[in-house]
Amino acid sequence: MNNPILTIVVPCYNPRPGWAQRVIEHFQAYQRQSAMSTVNLTLVNDGSNQNVGEKDFQLLRQAIPNLTFISYETNAGKGYALRQGVHHSHSDFYIFTDIDFPYTIESMLAVERALLEKGGIAVGHRDESYYGKVPLFRKILSQSFRWFIKRLLNLPVEDSQCGLKGFDANGKQIFLQTTVDRFLFDLEFLVIANGKAPVYA
């Protein structure tokens, strides 16, 4: 594909102080290393009522000219926010991640490379180093859920809840079919996509 365009979609709800500068630093670091001809950012303010103000948006607009900003007053959930962001973005490929950019630039670039090579839907992967940073109960819950996904739902990937995912234009149409607004919207996406598009980690 010549001159491919990528949009990174990021939902925002009551982020930690200093979030805008962190977004700028990570976005620009990714942009410098990306193989895409253009990298856009779509930021969705999902009804935040703290740590989000006009000064943050001005900072973002000055640093990231190719920014699309969407905002509404009532918190509706991450799934809803991402659907809004994806719907209002127009690219060849899309990647979504969290407002604190918890995944490494290399992890994001790996998703990008997979999309350029295979298209479809690329799901990020949380390795043992990730689980070493979370409480034991959360680790057990997450790994039990991964077992459920693999064994009972017969999906091609285990880790449906990883907050890093990418997809092409066909994946966008599938993602916009989702209806879950909060927890498990990722799982709904993969269930709908199963058999309709390549899904891989």
Image: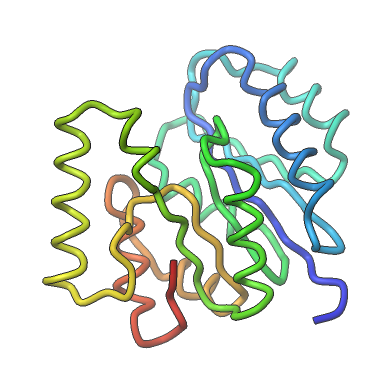
The residue lying toward the viewer, choosing from 34 and 47, is 34
- Residue 7, image quadrant: bottom right
- Name the residue: 38% across, 48% down: 127
Above or below: residue 135 compared with residue 85: above
Q: Is residue 194 left or right of residue 122?
A: left
Q: Is residue 99 left or right of residue 112?
A: left
For the N terminus, give its image quadrant.
bottom right
Q: Is residue 145 left or right of residue 39?
A: left
Q: Position of residue 14 (x, y in %)?
A: 48, 22
Above or below: residue 185 compared with residue 69: below
The residue lying toward the viewer, choosing from 47 and 145, is 145
Q: Position of residue 94 (x, y in %)?
A: 62, 61
- Name the residue: 59% across, 41% down: 104
For the C terminus, give its image quadrant.
bottom left
How many badges with numbers are in the image? 0
Q: Position of residue 92 (x, y in %)?
A: 71, 71
- Name the residue: 34% across, 61% down: 179
- Name the residue: 48% across, 18% down: 49
Q: Position of residue 128 (x, y in %)?
A: 34, 43
Q: Is residue 19 left or right of residue 176?
A: right
- Residue 109, image quadrant: bottom right
- Residue 63, image quadrant: top right
Rendering colour mode = rainbow
